[in-house]
Image (cartoon, rainbow, N blue to C red):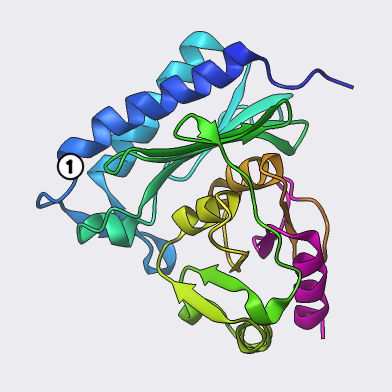
C-alpha cells in the first residue's frame, strides 16, 4: 500500500489554495465577462487564470503528477498521483457577488481521493483533510456531529432543478424525510458538514473536479461520502453523491434514494 500524503504534500496543497485566492479576490464583485459552456454552465476569465496557475505550480513541483481540471484538457490523468482542480466551484454565486463559491483542490492516488482542500478566499474559510490528516477548519479541528434521525437532519444541495426524472424523485423522498433542506451553497455546504452544522449533502451530475476534494475532508472529519449506491468515490464515479456526518443517517438516506 502506498503511504498517505505527507506533511509536505499538504503544505503544497495549501500553497495552491493561497495562490488561487490571490488571483480570485481581485475579480470578485467586479464586472466580468461570462461565457456559457456545454450545458449552459458559466465560465469566466477568473476560472481560467486560476487553473492555469495551479497547473503551472504542479508541473514545476511534481512534473510526474497528472492534473484533471474543469477548464482545460487533462494532463497525464493515468499517473499514480493526480491533482484535481475546480478553480471556482459555484461560479454563479461568484458572478453575482455572493461569497459562497470555493476553490477545490484534491489529490487522487490510484484513482481514489486522498487529500482535499475547500477554500473560500473572500471570507477566508478553509477546510483541509485527508487520509493522513484529521480535518481542520481555519487551522482548528473540524468534526461532524451525531445525527442518526433523518427527521432532525439538515440537508444541503446546490439546486433541486439539477435533478432530473428519477433523480428528482429520489431528492423529493429525501427532502420529505429531513427537517430542513437548504440550497445554493454548493461545495461550501459540504464543508459545513465537516463542521457539524449540516448533516447531509446530496448532489447529481457532478464532475470529477466537483467532488474529489469534498470526500477526503468529510471523511477526515468523521463522516462518510459515497455514490448513490454506497460505493466509495473515485475519479470514475458517476457524479451522484451522498455525504453525511453520521453513518446511520447516511444508511437511512441511501435506503430512501434506492427505492
Q: Residues within 10 Å of mark 1 (few under 14, many from 20)?
A: some
The magenta stretch spans which residues?
Answer: 233-259
Residue at 19% across / 46% down in the picture? 28
In the rendered view, does 69 fall on the left or right side of 252? left
> Relative to 207, is 179 above or below?
below
- Viewer-proximal residue, 110 or 254? 254
- Per the image, the residue denoted by label 1 is 27
- Viewer-proximal residue, 78 or 227? 227
Residue 141 visible in the picture: yes
Residue 106 visible in the picture: no
Rendered image quadrant of residue 25: top left
- Which quadrant of the rendered structure holds the N terminus? top right
In the rendered view, does 102 fall on the left or right side of 99? right
> Relative to 240, is 255 above or below?
below
- Viewer-proximal residue, 177 or 225? 177
- Across and down, in percent, residue 80 comes to 74, 24
- Across and down, in percent, residue 112 comes to 75, 38
> Relative to 34, is 217 above or below?
above
- Looking at the rendered structure, the secondary structure element under dot 1 is helix
- Across and down, in percent, residue 254 comes to 79, 73
- Which quadrant of the rendered structure holds the C terminus? bottom right
Q: How many marks?
A: 1
Rendered image quadrant of residue 96: bottom left
- Across and down, in percent, residue 257 comes to 75, 79
Residue at 73% across / 31% down in the picture? 131
Farthest left residue in view: 31
> Relative to 258, is 44 above or below?
above
Is 6 contained in the magenta span? no
Is 248 contained in the magenta span? yes
Residue at 37% across / 68% down in the picture? 40
Amino acid at each position: 500500500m502506498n503511504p498517505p500524503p505527507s506533511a509536505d504534500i499538504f503544505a503544497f496543497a495549501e500553497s495552491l489554495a493561497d495562490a488561487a485566492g490571490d488571483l480570485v479576490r481581485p475579480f470578485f464583485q467586479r464586472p466580468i465577462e461570462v461565457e456559457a459552456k456545454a450545458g449552459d454552465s458559466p465560465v469566466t476569465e477568473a476560472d481560467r487564470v486560476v487553473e492555469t496557475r495551479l497547473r503551472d505550480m504542479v508541473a514545476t513541483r511534481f512534473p510526474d503528477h497528472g492534473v484533471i481540471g474543469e477548464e482545460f484538457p487533462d494532463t497525464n490523468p493515468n499517473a499514480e498521483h493526480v491533482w484535481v482542480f475546480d478553480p471556482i466551484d459555484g461560479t454563479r454565486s461568484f458572478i453575482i457577488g455572493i461569497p459562497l463559491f470555493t476553490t477545490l483542490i484534491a489529490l487522487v492516488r490510484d484513482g481514489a481521493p486522498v487529500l482535499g482542500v475547500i477554500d473560500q478566499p473572500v471570507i477566508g474559510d478553509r477546510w483541509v483533510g485527508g487520509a493522513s490528516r484529521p480535518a481542520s477548519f481555519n487551522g482548528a479541528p473540524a468534526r461532524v456531529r451525531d445525527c442518526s434521525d433523518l427527521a432532525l437532519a439538515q440537508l444541503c444541495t446546490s439546486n433541486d432543478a439539477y435533478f432530473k426524472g428519477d433523480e428528482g424523485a429520489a431528492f423529493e423522498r429525501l427532502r420529505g424525510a429531513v427537517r430542513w433542506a437548504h440550497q445554493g451553497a454548493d461545495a461550501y455546504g459540504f464543508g459545513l458538514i465537516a463542521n457539524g452544522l449540516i448533516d447531509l449533502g446530496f448532489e447529481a451530475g457532478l464532475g470529477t473536479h466537483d467532488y474529489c476534494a469534498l470526500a477526503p475532508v468529510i471523511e477526515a472529519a468523521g463522516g462518510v461520502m459515497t455514490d448513490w449506491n454506497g460505493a466509495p468515490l473515485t475519479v470514475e464515479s458517476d457524479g451522484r453523491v451522498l455525504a453525511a456526518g453520521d453513518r446511520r443517517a447516511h444508511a437511512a438516506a441511501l435506503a430512501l434514494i434506492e427505492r
